[in-house]
Amino acid sequence: MIKSVRLDPELETKLERSARTLNVSQSEFIREAVAGGCDEVLAVSLADRLKAVIGVIESSGGRAADTGAAFRRILSRKRTE
């Protein structure tokens, strides 16, 4: 499948130099970079990616304090219907 991307002049120069340094085509360099980036993103769980923000905010719960119980009640009702 063919995809096209737009590169600014600085990135295009970096791509040319990097591919030349590794003695591969620019297409091969891009394919390897995309594959590596996809593997990196997909290898990490959502919980790991959100680790820096999970549990950061402390709250008394306010209006959301009883949402767990309310959700259980709704599920319970749906099971009996």
Image: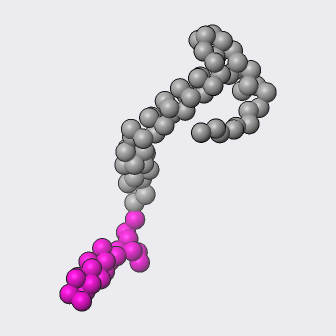
**Residue at image x 72%, y 27%?**
11
Q: Give the mark count.
A: 0
Colour scheme: one colour
- Is 9 placed left or right of 69 in the picture? right
Q: Could you tell me if residue 27 is visible in this image?
A: yes
Residue at horizontal 40 percent and vertical 60 percent from the top: 58
Outermost right residue:
9
Residue placed at 37% from the left, 69% from the top? 60
Q: Position of residue 39 (x, y in %)?
A: 44, 35
Judge left or right: residue 35 versus residue 7. left
Q: Position of residue 62 (x, y in %)?
A: 40, 75
Residue ID at (59%, 39%): 1
Vertical order, 61 against 52 (above or below): below
80 or 68, which lies in front? Answer: 80
Which residue occupies the foreground of this view, 23 or 10? Answer: 23
Quadrant position of residue 73: bottom left
**Placement of 20 over or under 13, stated as above or below:** above
- Drawn side of residue 65 relative to residue 72, left or right: right
Rendering coords of residue 55 (x, y %): 38, 54
Write the start and end of the magenta stretch as one range: 59-81
The extreme front residue here reads: 1
Q: Quadrant of the C terminus?
A: bottom left
Regarding residue 73, the answer to whether it shows in the image is no
Given residues 4 and 68, the one toward you in this image is 4
Q: Is residue 48 magenta?
A: no
